[in-house]
Image (cartoon, rainbow, N blue to C red):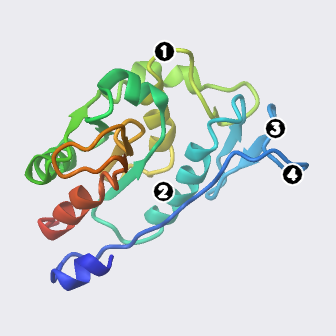
């Protein structure tokens, strides 16, 4: 956010930092819990390791409460993204082709590569729950897609792009501009996107 100010970004950017960890305790998320999300949707917890998407859902609802032109989220969301694209390319999914194209263009300019996966609504049924509005995880396959479909439930139809950096957040060796270890992947992309954004 400070870089955007220093570079004279003209777009109004609001950031929500939604963090969670997977720590067992007496008040931890449990299998079978029904969680009422911000905005009122209910979610059946069928996998407690899918806690990140739960807080992301609340963040997306927060974003829809603002007068926004677009919503972009970035998260280390699914191991499926890493298994699909490896550790040097992030997955991008969303509901707006023009916004996805902007994300891809920014990714190209700053050398933070992304690859678009389909937001295949045919898999949405995997999130159906008999006791809540949806479940927090789909089946064994297409995990990046079903995770994005879960997040889409909270964007209220706004133009939205989701960048899954599970594979790119860590680097096993120095390469290009990236050091060994945590990479900060996505920061350069989001800065470029904001600097070049127009409604």
Q: Name the residue under label 2.
A: 60
Label 3 or label 2, whichever lies nearer to me, is: 3
Task: Pick whichever, 57 or 171, lies toward us.
Answer: 171
Q: What element carries label 1?
A: loop
Task: Pick whichever, 178 or 63, lies toward us.
Answer: 178
Q: Earlier in the sequence, mark 1 or mark 2?
A: 2
Q: Distance between the residues labelled 3 and 4?
A: 9 Å
Mark 3 neighbour class, 10 Å CA radius: few under 14, some 14 to 19, many 20 or more: some
Q: Which of marks 1 and 3 is nearer the N terminus?
A: 3
Q: Is mark 3 on a helix, strand or loop?
A: loop
Task: Pick whichever, 150 or 41, lies toward us.
Answer: 150
Q: Is mark 4 on a helix, strand or loop?
A: loop
Q: How far apart are marks 1 and 2 (CA)?
A: 24 Å
Q: Which residue is drawn at 81% across and 32% down?
A: 32
Q: Distance between the residues labelled 1 and 3?
A: 23 Å
Q: Name the residue under label 4.
A: 27
Q: Mark 3 points at which residue?
A: 30
Residue 85 falls in image quadrant: top left
Q: Which residue is drawn at 36% across and 71% down?
A: 67
Q: Name the residue under label 1.
A: 141
Instruction: In the displayed orientation, state which residue is furthest to the right.
Output: 26
Image coordinates for residue 53, horizontal then vertical, percent: 56, 44
What is the quadrant of the N terminus in the image? bottom left
């Amino acid at each position: 956010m400070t870089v955007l100010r220093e570079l004279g970004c003209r777009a109004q950017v609001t950031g929500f930092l939604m963090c969670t960890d997977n720590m067992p305790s007496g008040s931890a998320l449990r299998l079978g819990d029904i969680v009422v999300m911000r905005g009122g949707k209910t979610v059946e917890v069928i996998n407690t390791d899918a806690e990140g998407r739960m807080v992301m859902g609340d963040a997306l609802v927060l974003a829809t409460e603002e007068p926004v032109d677009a919503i972009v989220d970035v998260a280390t969301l699914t191991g499926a993204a890493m298994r699909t694209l490896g550790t040097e390319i992030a997955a991008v999914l969303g509901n707006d082709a023009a916004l996805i194209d902007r994300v891809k263009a920014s990714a190209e300019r700053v050398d933070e590569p992304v690859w678009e996966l389909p937001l295949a609504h045919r898999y949405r049924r995997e999130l159906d729950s008999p006791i809540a509005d949806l479940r927090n995880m789909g089946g064994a396959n297409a995990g990046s897609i079903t995770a994005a479909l879960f997040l889409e439930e909270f964007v209220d139809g706004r133009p939205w792009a989701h960048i899954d950096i599970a594979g790119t957040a860590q680097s096993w060796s120095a390469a290009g501009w990236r050091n060994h270890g945590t990479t900060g992947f996505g920061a350069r992309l989001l800065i470029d996107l904001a600097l070049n954004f127009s409604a």
